[in-house]
Image (cartoon, rainbow, N blue to C red):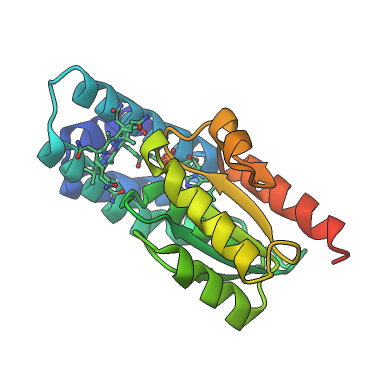
């Protein structure tokens, strides 16, 4: 079995030690491309989600897989994204209230920091008011909201309403994304853009900042 297949198996099995050992091997083998690593771990988590849906896995199994990914990512982080200083801007990011999924968001945070952005990560289960306060405090250019599902739709709407009420909606562009989040949901909610992976997130941020004259 090749390295990435072994990596996927370790994640699906929820074996954090094996995932970490393979991650270390990956950093030693120059030919494994960073986007292949992210695709492979995302694919493994898709499989885990599928097993949860069919009743083969329950929450503890999903958590074990998440821990395996977290451990591997902490080792892979310096290797995954090319450090660049091309463009800069101030970004506030967090997972909305009611949602504790953070793997995808953390990957996005690493990619944005590596690209030269100043990123303020508020973590998970973040209430609308906290987003607004931080946007104001750091004079953010972009607000990135991670939300996994239709049941967190209301939380997204609350953030947009709170921004509006604080008079900030015209000043900050809002981008959403996250596991099981769709373009359609983003459109319904009324954010400025939606992004589904690292590449599209970087492209969207760059484009929106360009529009703001940076
Ligand atoms: C791991 C996991 C968990 C873990 C989370 C641990 C952690 N530390 O994050 C735990 C066990 C806690 C969990 C709990 C639950 N989960 Co869960 N979970 C998953 C799982 C298997 C993987 C998610 C993941 O990490 N994927 C890997 C990352 C890399 O992918 P990603 O998140 O999509 O991120 C990428 C992009 O989306 C994007 N991105 C991510 N964030 C952001 C943010 C922005 C701003 C942008 C622009 C882009 C972006 O870039 C990333 C990199 O490519 C998914 C299955 C799936 N198919 O996604 C279910 C899934 C998301 N969970 C689901 C459910 C239902 C739940 C629970 C409600 C279960 C329950 N009954 O309690 C709870 C909810 C808890 C809560 N209140 O949040 C459902 C959601 C269904 C839906 N459509 O609404 C899924 C789809 C599983 C399923 N098939 O049913 N879960």
User: Which image quadrant shows ligand 1?
Assistant: top left
**Which residue is drawn at the image coordinates 45% and 39% (left, top)?**
37
Q: In terms of image quadrants, where is residue 62? A: top left
Q: Residue furthest right?
A: 213
Q: Nearer the viewer, residue 160 or 102?
A: 160
Task: Report if residue 21 is visible in the image.
Answer: no
Q: Is residue 169 left or right of residue 5?
A: right
Q: Give the answer, above or below, for where 184 lies relative to 130.
A: above
Q: Give the answer, above or below, for where 126 lies relative to 37.
A: below
Percent x, y of residue 128: 46, 63
Q: Residue furthest bottom?
A: 137
Q: Nearer the viewer, residue 168 or 118?
A: 168
Q: Nearer the viewer, residue 205 or 176?
A: 176
**Which residue is drawn at the image coordinates 52% and 58% (left, top)?**
159
Q: From the image, which quarter does the C terminus lie in?
A: bottom right
**Which residue is drawn at the image coordinates 67% and 43% (left, top)?**
193
Percent x, y of residue 14: 17, 39
Task: Report if residue 25 is visible in the image.
Answer: yes
Q: How many marks?
A: 0
Q: Give the answer, above or below, for where 181 lies relative to 23.
A: above
Q: Residue furthest top?
A: 54
Q: Is residue 150 left or right of residue 175?
A: left
Percent x, y of residue 52: 20, 26
Percent x, y of residue 184: 58, 29
Q: From the image, which quarter does the N terminus lie in?
A: top left
Q: Is residue 40 left or right of residue 65?
A: right
Q: In terms of image quadrants, where is residue 152? A: top left
């Amino acid at each position: 079995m090749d390295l990435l297949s072994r990596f996927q198996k370790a994640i699906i099995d929820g074996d954090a030690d094996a995932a970490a050992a393979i991650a270390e091997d990956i950093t030693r083998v120059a030919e494994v491309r960073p986007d292949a690593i992210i695709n492979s771990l995302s694919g493994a988590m898709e499989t885990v989600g599928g097993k949860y849906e069919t009743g083969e896995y329950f929450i503890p199994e999903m958590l074990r897989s998440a821990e395996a990914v977290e451990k591997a990512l902490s080792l892979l982080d310096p290797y995954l994204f090319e450090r660049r200083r091309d463009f800069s801007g101030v970004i506030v990011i967090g997972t909305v209230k009611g949602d504790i999924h953070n793997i995808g968001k953390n990957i996005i945070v690493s990619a944005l920091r590596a690209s030269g952005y100043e990123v303020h990560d508020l973590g998970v289960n973040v209430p609308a008011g906290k987003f607004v306060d931080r946007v104001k405090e750091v004079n953010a250019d972009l607000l990135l909201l991670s939300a996994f599902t239709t049941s967190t739709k209301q939380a997204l709407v609350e953030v947009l309403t709170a921004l509006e009420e604080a008079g900030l909606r015209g000043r900050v562009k809002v981008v959403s994304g996250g596991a099981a989040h769709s373009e359609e949901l983003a459109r319904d909610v009324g954010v400025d853009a939606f992004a589904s992976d690292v590449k599209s997130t970087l492209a969207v941020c760059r484009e929106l900042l360009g529009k703001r004259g940076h």
